[in-house]
Image: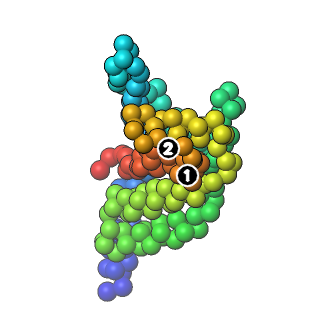
Amino acid sequence: MKTVRKKQNNLVFKLALASLKGKVLKVGWVAEKFYPPRKRITKENGKTKVTLVPSNFTTASVGYIAEFGSVKNNIPARPIMAPTNAEQKSLWSKISESQVRKIFKGEQTVDGALEVLGLRIGGDYRKKIKSITEPPLAEATVKARIRTRNQGRKNKITEATSTFRKPLVFDGILLNSVTHAVEGDT
C-alpha cells in the first residue's frame, strides 16, 4: 500500500513540475496602458474651450520613474518594488510553500497558486505606494496640482491639503493600475 501512495505522490509531483514549465508571474504596471488624457481649459474670444491633451506616459514609465527617479526632470526616487520585495520576501515564500503543498494535494492548480501570489504581491505594492511620504513633493508640484484641480471649478482651492502634498497618489492612477498576470502555457 505504501508503494502505491509513493507512486501517486511522485506522479502528482511530476505533473506539478510539468505544469510549471513556461509559467511566469508578472506583477507591476502594464507598458501599453497610458495615463488618461488631461483636460486643458483655455479662454478664446471670451468663451471657455476644453481640449484633451493625450498623455505620453504609460503606467509602467511612471512606475519606473517612481522607483528610480529622474535626474533629468529633477524627480527623486520613491522606491516601491525593491523595498517591498525585501520586506515581504519571507511572507511571500510562506505563501508559495503553502500553495505548493495545496498543488501536491490536488487542492490547487499552478495557475491558481500564481494568482494567489500575484494578488498578494500587487496588494503589498499598493500598500507601499500609500505609505510613501518622503521625499516630499516640490512646492512647484503642489501648486501644479492645485491648478489642475481648480481647472473649470467655481470654488477654487487655495490651500494644499495633505492629499495635494502626498507623493504618488494624487490622481490614483499609479496606485490603481498595479496589476498581475500569469503567463505561459495553460
Distance between the alpha carbons at the discs numbered 1 and 2: 9 Å
Please give the residue where the numbered disc 2 appears in the rendered image: 157
- The residue closer to the viewer here, 162 or 129, is 162
Residue 86: percent from the left, percent from the top? 63, 59
| In this view, 123 is above or below 6 | above
> The residue under label 2 is which amino acid type?
Ile
Mark 2 secondary-structure assignment = loop
In the image, residue 181 sits, relative to residue 72, either above or below, namely: below
| Mark 2 closeness class: few <14, some 14–19, many ≥20 residues within 10 Å | few
- Residues 16 and 79: in front is 79
Q: Nearer the viewer, residue 161 or 71?
A: 161
Nearest the viewer among 113 and 78 is 78
Q: Left or right: where does residue 142 sit relative to residue 4? A: right
Q: In percent of the image, x 34 and y 75: which residue is there? A: 105
Secondary element at image label 1: loop
Say if mark 1 contacts mark 2, CB within 8 Å: yes
Residue holding disc 1:
161
Evaluate whether residue 13 shows in this view: yes
